[in-house]
Structure formats: C-alpha cells, structure tokens
Amino acid sequence: MPALRTLVWFKRDLRVHDHAPLVAAQRSADAAGLFIIEPEWLHSPECDAQHVDFVLRSLQELREALAARGMPLLVRVGSAVPVLAQLHAELGFGQLLSHEETGPGWSYVRDVQVGQWCQAQQVVWQEFTQTGVVRRLRSRSGWAGRWQARMDAPLQLLEGGFVAAAPLDQPALPSLAELGFSPHGRQLQRAGEKAARRTLQTFLAERGYDYRKALSSPLSAQDGCSRLSPHLAFGTVSLRTVHQATEVTIANTPDRTLAHALRGFAGRLRWHCHFMQKLEDEPGH
C-alpha cells in the first residue's frame, strides 16, 4: 500500500517520548499533529480552568518539540467530527493515528462518532494502547499479567523527524479568557514533558524516600508523593516510562529503605489502571 498522509490526534498524550502514534506516523508520506479543544470537555463537570491552563502550557512545549522534528501541531477549538471534517477538506489525510482513551461518557460518544466518520470518509483510524486498560475485556482473570506485559514492553521512541503535511507556522494558542474561563488564581505545577520528567527524577532520587508514610498526611504528601498526577492525567509522561524508571531505581539503589518505599509506589501504578479498567468495563456502576 502507498504511504498515506497522516494526522496524529493528540488527546491525553501530550509528549513525544514513548508515543506509539508518532512512531507509526514516521512511516507516512507526511504528517501533521492535531489537538482539539472540545466544548464537550470545557463544559463538562470534570473540567476546571486550572486543567485547561495546564493543557495549554503543555501544548506550547509540545508544539515546539514537534516543530523541531518537522511536524506542525494544529490546535483547533470545536467538536471532534466537524474539526476533522474541515481538516480533511484542507489536508486530505488518509490515516488518523491516536491513543485509546478511557474517559467519561462524552468522550466515548465522541469516539463512536469519529469512528463512523472515518468509515464514511474511508479514513483509516488506528488506535494504540498507552495504559494497562484492556478494551472489550470479557474477564479480568489474567489482567495483572497483561498489565505487566504492556508496562515492560520497549518504549516507543522517535528516530529522526517528519515530513510536514502543513505549514509549520501556526496561530498562537487560545488564552483562558478566549475559551471562556476567568483566572483561576492557583499556583500550578509546571506543565509539559520536560517538567514531568524532572518531577519523576526528583521523586525517584529523593522525594520518594518516605513515600509510604508521607502519602497519608496532607502536610507531608505535597513533597513526599510523586506529584505526577497531572502529568499522567494529560500524558506529558507515559505510565510505562514511570513504571520502568521506578523498577530500574528499585533494582539499582543500594538504599533498601528507598527501594521499599518505591515498591509501594509501583503497586499504586497498577491501581491507577485497575480502577480505569473498572470504568472501561462498567461505566454505569
């Protein structure tokens, strides 16, 4: 088959490291990235101005990282199908690549609609796993082994760059005000992939030493916990990267107290996917 023009749809995976859709896009004729700021998310009860702020800051870094590799990152505001339809008219892409997403009802409905649109337009949509959540799982028997196999699999790393499917110069990202949000007034953690990796490194090297005790108190948890929740939520670091870095630290540190603490953290990474699996399997419960 001839190589297709490809659109990489970023959702909760705002990074370049360990990103299977990006690696797959390197086999394309040319490629562009897309992030959609969806009104369904902005108006949902789980969305807050601080979440949007974190995403916008992460997108700025991601746009720069992709541009350095020859891929433009298009950021559009609107519902997914109309945005994809407009870009299809402009770019004529034949392949859509993304990660799977387990989320609230609106994201499930959106993915069904995108699948129907792709089929009608003869666009090949390929989704990749990025967590331990298994789609269409009939039984949780053996789930732990599947999780382990996914987390131990080699990281998906880019080699070289891309041929751009659109001009690299992109309009500025929208502001919180332009998206209908007032200033949130909170001091947020630093956003983006670089901050995520620094946060992981400081936790594994220093802050995680007293993790098992620190997580039980709001006074100690602020520093003693990983501080990776927003980064895992929006994918500025992959769960697999966190898992593998944790296991390497446990295996190599001579400090058994630190190793014991990090073993507790490693177990909670499994919990992360275990509860997402319940949402995937039984969203009505």
Image: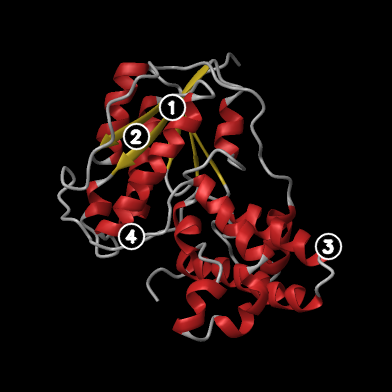
User: Which of disc 3 and disc 2 is earlier in sequence?
Assistant: 2
Element on which disc 3 rests: helix
* Residue 108 higher or lower than 8, as above or below: below
Mark 4–mark 1 Cα distance, whole angstroms, equals 24 Å
Q: Are marks 2 and 3 in contact (CB under 8 Å)?
A: no
At label 4, counting other C-alpha atoms closer than 10 Å, the crowd grade (few under 14, some 14-19, many 20 or more) is: few
Q: Nearer the viewer, mark 2 or mark 4?
A: 4
Residue, x 15% and y 55% (percent of image)?
A: 182
Element on which disc 4 rests: helix
The quadrant the C terminus occupies is bottom left
Mark 2–mark 4 Cα distance, whole angstroms, equals 18 Å
Q: Which mark is residue 105?
A: 4
**Left or right: where 49 falls relative to 140:** left
- Give percent across and percent down for residue 49: 25, 57
According to the picture, the residue beneath numbered tag 1 turns out to be 123
In which quadrant of the rendered view does residue 156 lie? top right
User: Which of disc 1 and disc 4 is earlier in sequence?
Assistant: 4
Q: Are marks 3 and 4 in contact (CB under 8 Å)?
A: no
Residue, x 15% and y 49% (percent of image)?
A: 180
User: Which of disc 4 and disc 3 is earlier in sequence?
Assistant: 4
At label 1, counting other C-alpha atoms closer than 10 Å, the crowd grade (few under 14, some 14-19, many 20 or more) is: some
**Amino acid tagged 3:** Asn
Work out whether residue 203 or residue 243 is closer to the camera in this orientation and state it.
Answer: 203
